[in-house]
Image (tube, rainbow, N blue to C red):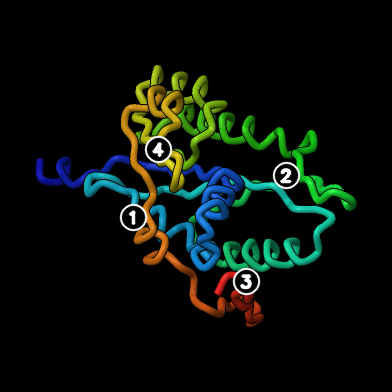
Amino acid sequence: MNENKAVKRKAIVYIDGFNLYFALKEKDWKSLMWLDLVKLSQRLLRPDQQLVRVKYFTARIRNDPPKERRQKAFLDALATLDGLDIYEHNRIKCFDCGKEWPDSKEKQTDVSIATQMLIDSYTPNVIDDIILVTADSDQCPAMRAVRALGKHVLIVLPPGRINYMEVQKAADGRLELTKRMFRESLLPEEVMTKGGFAIKRPEKYK
């Protein structure tokens, strides 16, 4: 009986990368963008949960070399973390006006998050709890679907998104990310790859 009490609920954290990025950008929290997403995810767990995986969904920036370099450094640093999967799509930027918009591949990001949640929920013994970091109401149908399968869904709101009510109503519970959570979840100034290559924190993130 003691062994049964020790069994923890399996949780997977799904992170909408651009939703999180733009929330940090709006707050002007550039120094908090160099994030260890596994460490951040662990801070979202209850004592009765264990972290199975972290799944990070993003879009590659195009036509903006400085941003491309910063993003590459960040993704390369994330690739060194155990327990994290990265799902990449694309983004377009106009050379003339600087405006960014999603291309057909980035539009797949929302579908990719929903698909992964459903796949994990339908696969036996993979997951009990879904922790979804986003304020995007496009995820509401998938959230309701996995809840119908008996999964518990916690919506984790990026900073400044507390008024996004639709996505909160589709979940079993909600949590808002705080500045302290970010501060306590930063990557080291220099991250070493398995091949011995040093990835340095971009100057703009310092």
Q: Nearer the viewer, residue 172 or 83?
A: 172
- Quadrant containing the C terminus in the rendered view: bottom right
Residue annotated with mark 4: 162
Residue found at x 56% / y 80%: 190
Contact between labelled residues 1 and 2, with CB atoms less than 8 Å apart: no
Residue found at x 49% / y 42%: 14
Residue annotated with mark 2: 89
Circle 4: element type: loop
Contact between labelled residues 3 and 2, with CB atoms less than 8 Å apart: no
Q: Amino acid at mark 2?
A: His
Q: Residue 83 appears at what percent x and percent y?
A: 48, 56
Q: Residue 11 appears at what percent x and percent y?
A: 37, 42
Q: CA distance from mark 2 to mark 1?
A: 27 Å
Looking at the image, is 85 positioned above or below residue 182? above
Q: CA distance from mark 2 to mark 4?
A: 27 Å
The answer to which image quadrant residue 71 occupies is: bottom right
Residue annotated with mark 1: 43
114 left or right of 66? left
Of the image marks 2 and 3, the number of the one nearer the N terminus: 2
Residue annotated with mark 3: 204
Q: Amino acid at mark 3?
A: Lys
Residue found at x 80% / y 59%: 64
